[in-house]
Image (tube, rainbow, N blue to C red):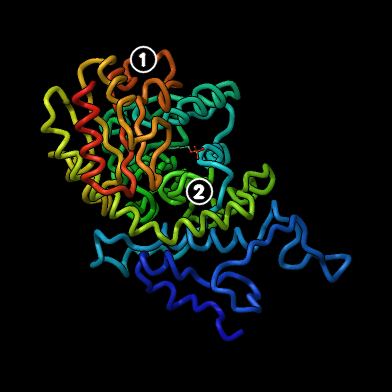
Amino acid sequence: MADAPRESSQQRLHPHTALVHGEDPYHANAVRASTPPIYLSSTFSSQHATSFGEYNYSRSANPTRDALEAKLAALDAAQSAISQDSQQASRLAYVRSLACASGVTALNTLLTVLAPGDEVLCSQDVYGGTFRLFSDAWQQRGIIVTYVDATNAEAVQQAWSQKTKLLHIEPVGNPLMSVCDIALLATIAHERGGLLSVDNTSLTSLHCKPLVLGADIAIQSATKYLCGHGDVTSGVVSLRDEQLAKRFAFHHNAEGSALAPFDCYMLHRGMESLAPRMYWQERTAQNLAKRLQTIPGITRVRHPSLLTARDARVHSAQSSGHGAVISFETGNEERSKHIVEALKLFAIRVSFGSVTSSASMPIFMSHRAIPAALASLRPPTDLIRLSIGLEHEEDLWKDIEQACAKG
Ligand SMILES: *Cc1c(COP(=O)(O)O)cnc(C)c1O
């Protein structure tokens, strides 16, 4: 075929280019279509009665999913913009990505490396649904879950027990923006014979490369920035060890966790504009975060661009960008409620990373599932979280100003 994939030249492409070019994985694209065909077929026939062809059943493998997974793996393996110098040295030889039905499904694949009686150490500042999955669903099945302040390497070392198999973190917690050092925590986990998994949803594999930094497992909810348009629930798990990847792939098939073909196409399409969306949204977020600090009564504005000291150093060494989620406090739950309800351009809804802006009070929505024993870790009741979309900064600012004046 004239346009056969050129693996070696593909490897040299900058991530921004790779996002729109991909590696022509559209097997037998006989009509030279410029967008990937969607193979909705659940089965593929075989020429022989005693063996399968390349594809046989879409739960196991599907060409549209293969195309997406190749793109996801290329992005997780590619060197990030922060250290071009070491581009050659640190590129990963092997990365495999598995597209999953949701971000939570991707998190649930971590059970591949855990058995009843094993312990997972989990950062305290993680997504609310991670608490629900680990503390409610997994603990019922005999997994021990211990929460730890993973911004503190000593606390992690002290918490590590004979039973610990896995450390799970987010590089920048959301909405509180606590920063975990991926490379340092990978070393700590590996010295103790454990694995490190990183939920990279808020920075994405465009900005942060957990596998390049030493993590074993990188997870994203693709529902957020990767898809970017709020119309596909999806997740991804990426691995850099071939044996481990085979175990995950086995379970992905055995448990039926894969993303459906049409959704694979939608996510593939959304990812083509990931870089310009991300840069635009986070630039607006950074400007709005600064401007929010000037509004009387608004306190503790949080955005990764406002980090200081150790947090700023660790963050800038492991991420080439900040994401577009801002949070702030108002000193009063009622005032926060009035502000959120007075916003016109920001819809009140959970989730983030879409092209339209949204607002929420995490304690009542995304972080409701924090276990009672960890009540001290709940976000403040007056905390407002904004996800900044593609609207013009001045329109968003005027909206925030009028809402705060009413609130
Ligand atoms: C949303 C989210 C998830 C869960 O993803 P779903 O696609 O909603 O299942 C996991 N981790 C983080 C950090 C998230 O923001």
Say if 27 sits above or below 114 in the image.
Answer: below
Per the model, the C-alpha gap separating discs 2 and 1 is 29 Å
State the residue lying farthest toward the bottom: 2
Say if 402 sits above or below 65 in the image.
Answer: above
Q: Report the residue at 45% width, 26% height from top.
A: 131
Q: Position of residue 397 (x, y in %)?
A: 21, 39
Q: Residue 45 versus residue 243: which sits nearer the camera?
A: 45
- Disc 1 designates what residue? 375
Question: At label 1, which amino acid type do we have?
Answer: Ala
Would residue 153 be seen by someone viewing this image from the given angle? no
Q: Report the residue at 54% width, 59% height from top.
A: 68
Q: Report the residue at 65% width, 49% height from top.
A: 250
Residue 262 falls left or right of residue 336:
right
Name the quadrant of the N terminus: bottom right
- Disc 2 designates what residue? 237
Q: Is mark 1 within 8 Å of ligand 1?
A: no
Which of the marked residues, 2 or 1, is nearer the chain's N terminus? 2
Q: Position of residue 72 (x, y in %)?
A: 48, 58
Secondary structure beneath dot 2 equals: strand
Q: Report the residue at 36% width, 15% height from top.
A: 375
